[in-house]
Each structure stands twice: as structure tokens, then as C-alpha cells.
């Protein structure tokens, strides 16, 4: 039987400006978003199954969703 994954939400800190924000990961383990403060494209990924903190890195060549 196929598992239905629930969206995961968590917080991250922008590595460029230090602004904290919230992101949601839906049906994937990472996504590209734009920092709501400085606009930098960030690759957001999960730190682990039980963590509510997300990891943010500057995205190379991706477009924000």
C-alpha cells in the first residue's frame, strides 16, 4: 500500500541576511524558495524526520516556487 506523505513545515535561517522564516515541504525532501526579506533564492531541505528545523543554502541556478 502506498504511503501518503503529509506536508512538513519548519523554520530556517537565510544564510545571506540571517532572517528567519517558515517553509513547507510537500511530497519532496527539498524545495527552492526566495527569502522573504532579501529575495535570495534558497534551497530548503529537511534536517531529519523528527526535526522542525530546516536547512537553507543559497540555490545555484534554481527558480523560486
Image (cartoon, rainbow, N blue to C red):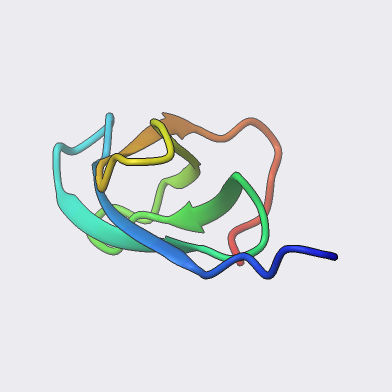
Q: Position of residue 34 (x, y in %)?
A: 44, 57
Residue 9, above or below 14: below
Say which of 21 and 46 sits in front: 46
Say which of 1 and 6 sits in front: 1
Say which of 44 and 52 sits in front: 52
Residue occupying image coordinates x 49% and y 57%: 33
Residue occupying image coordinates x 19% and y 38%: 17
Q: Is residue 13 left or right of residue 62?
A: left
Residue 30, above or below 5: above
Find residue 16 and report its image quarter: top left
Residue occupying image coordinates x 70% and y 37%: 61
Q: Is residue 41 left or right of residue 4?
A: left
- The quadrant of the rendering that contains the C terminus is bottom right
Q: Position of residue 53 (x, y in %)?
A: 25, 41
Residue 16, above or below 44: above
Residue occupying image coordinates x 69% and y 45%: 62
Q: Position of residue 64 (x, y in %)?
A: 59, 59
For this orientation, the residue located farthest to the front is 1
- The quadrant of the rendering that contains the N terminus is bottom right
Residue 16, above or below 39: above
Amino acid at each position: 500500500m502506498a504511503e501518503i506523505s503529509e506536508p512538513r513545515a519548519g523554520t530556517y535561517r537565510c544564510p545571506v541576511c540571517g532572517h528567519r522564516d517558515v517553509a513547507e515541504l510537500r511530497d519532496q525532501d527539498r524545495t527552492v524558495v526566495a527569502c522573504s526579506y532579501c529575495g535570495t533564492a534558497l534551497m530548503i531541505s529537511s534536517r531529519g524526520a523528527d526535526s522542525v528545523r530546516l536547512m537553507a543554502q543559497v540555490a545555484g541556478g534554481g527558480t523560486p516556487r
